[in-house]
Amino acid sequence: MLSTNFCFGVFMELSEALFTLVHAVRNNMKYEIKQLALDLSPMHFKSLKAISRIDNCTGQKLTELMGRDKAQINRLIKELVSQELINKIENKVDKRSQILALSEKGLEVMNTFKKVEKKVFNKMTHDIPAEQLKAFVETTEKLKNNL
C-alpha cells in the first residue's frame, strides 16, 4: 500500500508537470503565431481548427466544443466572417441554424497554422521515441476520461 505522503508527492509532481507542459506549449504556439503577423488570437485559431474538424459545424456545436457561452461564440463567428475566414451556409436540415465552413482564406490560414503546430510539436518531441509518445497519449486519455 502506498503511503499518503507518497501519493500526495506524486500528485503534486503530476500537477506541476501538466501545468508547465501546457504553459510551455501555449507560450511556444503564441510566439510562433505572433511571427505570422496575422491579426488573429489563439482563440481564433482554435475556432478555425474546430470548425474544420466538426461535420456540419453550427454555432451551437462550436459553443459546446469550445466550452464558451453562446454570446462569446457568436461574437467570434461574426469576427471570423468579417475577416472572410469562414462562410455561413444555409442548413438544409435545420433552417434555424447555419453551417459554418472555412473559406479559401480560412483554409490557407489553417494550413499555415498546421505548419506552426507541427513545428512546435516536432521541437517538443524530437528526442522522444514513438513508443513513449504513444504511452503518453494513452495515459493522458485515461486521465481525461477519469474526470
Image (cartoon, rainbow, N blue to C red):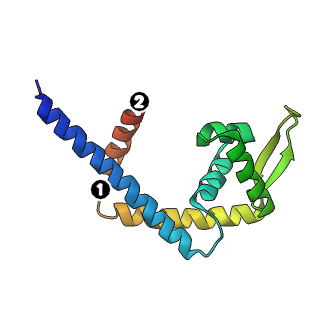
Q: Pointer 1: residues within 10 angstroms few (<14), some, or many (20+)?
A: few
Q: Considering depth in this image, is 98 or 63 the residue closer to the camera?
A: 63
Check the image and name the residue furthest to the top: 1
For discs 2 and 1, the disc positioned in front in the rendered view: 2
Q: Is residue 34 left or right of residue 6?
A: right
Q: Name the residue under label 1.
A: 129
Q: Percent position (x, y) of residue 82?
A: 80, 61
* Quarter the N terminus occupies: top left
Q: Which residue is drawn at 66% across and 54% down?
A: 48
Q: Name the residue under label 2.
A: 147
Q: Percent position (x, y) of residue 128?
A: 29, 58
Is residue 131 shown to the viewer in this render? Answer: no
The amino acid beneath tag 1 is Pro
Q: Percent position (x, y) of residue 91?
A: 85, 38
Q: Percent position (x, y) of residue 57?
A: 72, 42
Q: Label 2's element?
A: loop
Q: Residue at x 72, y 43 (%)?
A: 71
Q: How many labels does the image show?
A: 2
Query: Where 103 falls versus 9 (above or below)?
Result: below
Is residue 33 shown to the viewer in this render? Answer: yes
Q: Pointer 2: residues within 10 angstroms few (<14), some, or many (20+)?
A: few
